[in-house]
C-alpha cells in the first residue's frame, strides 16, 4: 500500500493505535482527518500535529456516522482511505447481569460502526483511482479473553466481515486490509491495563512495514500466532489464557 498522497479518515484517531497510524500517514504527506468523541483529545492530537484535521463524532450513533460521511466527503472529496479503528473494551462478568446498554454500546462502536461506515463509503471509494478500507480487529478475534466477552465477539465478527468484504470488492479499486493487533500498550479498556504489552511505537512500525509490503493482513506477536493457529492450538491457547488467577 502506498502511504503518501492519500486522504485518510481515522475513527478513534485521537489516541492509541488510531493516532499512531494517523501520525505515520501525516509524516509521508497524506491528508489525515481524525474523529472521536472527545474534542479535547482531538485538539491535543492536532496541537502535536497541526496538519491533522479533526471532527467530533460518536460513531456509536448511526445519525452521527451519516453526518460524518456527508461532511468528510464534502470537505475532502479526494478521501480514499478509511481506517475503522474506533473501539472500546469492557471487562465484566455476564452472570452479574450487566445493563443491556453497556453491552450494546460496545457492539455499536466495535461492530455496527465499522460495518455501517464501510457501506457508506464504498460508493464514494468506487469513484477513486485507488482506495482502501482498513479494519482494526484483534488477536482476540481468534482466541478470546473470557473476561471481555463482547470485545472478543465483536472482533471475531469483524474478522468475518472483513473476509467477505474483501471478497466482494475484489476486482474494484478498493483494497481491504485487516489490521490485527496483539495487546498493545495503550489505554484501551482503561489506563494502565496494558503497560506490559507491546510498546505502541514498535507495533505501529510493524504495521507500516507490512502495509508498505502490500500485506492484506497485518499481525504482530500474539496476533501472528493466534490468527494462523489450528483449532487444536486455539483450544489450548484459550485454556491457557483463561486459567483462574
Image: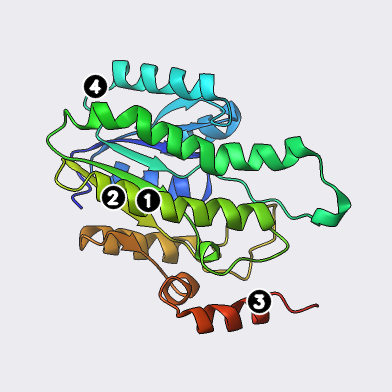
Whether the residues at callouts 1 and 3 have beta carbons within 8 Å, the answer is no
The crowding category of the residue bearing disc 3, from other C-alpha atoms within 10 Å (few below 14, some 14 to 19, many at least 20), is: few
Is 147 on the left or on the right of 231, as rendered? right
- CA separation, marks 2 and 3? 30 Å
> First in sequence: mark 1 or mark 3?
1
Question: Do the CB atoms of the residues marked 4 and 3 lie less than 8 Å apart?
Answer: no
- CA gap, disc 2 and disc 4: 23 Å
What residue is drawn where x is 73% and y is 62%?
147
Does dot 2 land on a helix, a strand or a loop? helix
Q: Closer to the camera: disc 2 or disc 4?
A: 2
Whole-number angstrom distance, CA of label 1 to CA of label 4: 25 Å
Q: In this figure, which residue is indicated by the disc labeled 4? A: 77
Query: Helix or strand or loop: what does disc 1 sit on?
Result: helix
Mark 4 or mark 3, earlier in chain? 4
For the residues labelled 2 and 1, say whether their Cβ atoms are less than 8 Å apart: yes
Q: As displayed, is residue 98 above or below residue 63?
A: below
Between the residue at mark 4 and the residue at mark 3, the CA separation in whole angstroms equals 45 Å
Numbered badge on residue 162: 1
* Quarter of the figure with residue 77: top left
Give the residue pinned by disc 2: 166
Amino acid at each position: 500500500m502506498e502511504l503518501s498522497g492519500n486522504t485518510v479518515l481515522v475513527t478513534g484517531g485521537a489516541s492509541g493505535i488510531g493516532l499512531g497510524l494517523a501520525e505515520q500517514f501525516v509524516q509521508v504527506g497524506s491528508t489525515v482527518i481524525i474523529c472521536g468523541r472527545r474534542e479535547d483529545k482531538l485538539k491535543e492530537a492536532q496541537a502535536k500535529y497541526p496538519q491533522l484535521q479533526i471532527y467530533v463524532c460518536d460513531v456509536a450513533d448511526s445519525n452521527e456516522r451519516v453526518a460524518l460521511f456527508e461532511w468528510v466527503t464534502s470537505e475532502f472529496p479526494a478521501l480514499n482511505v478509511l481506517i475503522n479503528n474506533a473501539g472500546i473494551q469492557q471487562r465484566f462478568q455476564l452472570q452479574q447481569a450487566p445493563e443491556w446498554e453497556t453491552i450494546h454500546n460496545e457492539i455499536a462502536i466495535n461492530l455496527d460502526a465499522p460495518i455501517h461506515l464501510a457501506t457508506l463509503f464504498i460508493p464514494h471509494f468506487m469513484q477513486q483511482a485507488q482506495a482502501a478500507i482498513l479494519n482494526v480487529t484483534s488477536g482476540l478475534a481468534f482466541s478470546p479473553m473470557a473476561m471481555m466477552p463482547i470485545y472478543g465477539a465483536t472482533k471475531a465478527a469483524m474478522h468475518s466481515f472483513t473476509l467477505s468484504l474483501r471478497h466482494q470488492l475484489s476486482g474494484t479499486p478498493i483494497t481491504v486490509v485487516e489490521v490485527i493487533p496483539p495487546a498493545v500498550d495503550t489505554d484501551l479498556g482503561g489506563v494502565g491495563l496494558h503497560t506490559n504489552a507491546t510498546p505502541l511505537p514498535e507495533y505501529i512500525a510493524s504495521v507500516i512495514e507490512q502495509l508498505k509490503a502490500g500485506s492484506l493482513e497485518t499481525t504482530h506477536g500474539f496476533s501472528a500466532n493466534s490468527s494462523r493457529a489450528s483449532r487444536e492450538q486455539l483450544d489450548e491457547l484459550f485454556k491457557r489464557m483463561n486459567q483462574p488467577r
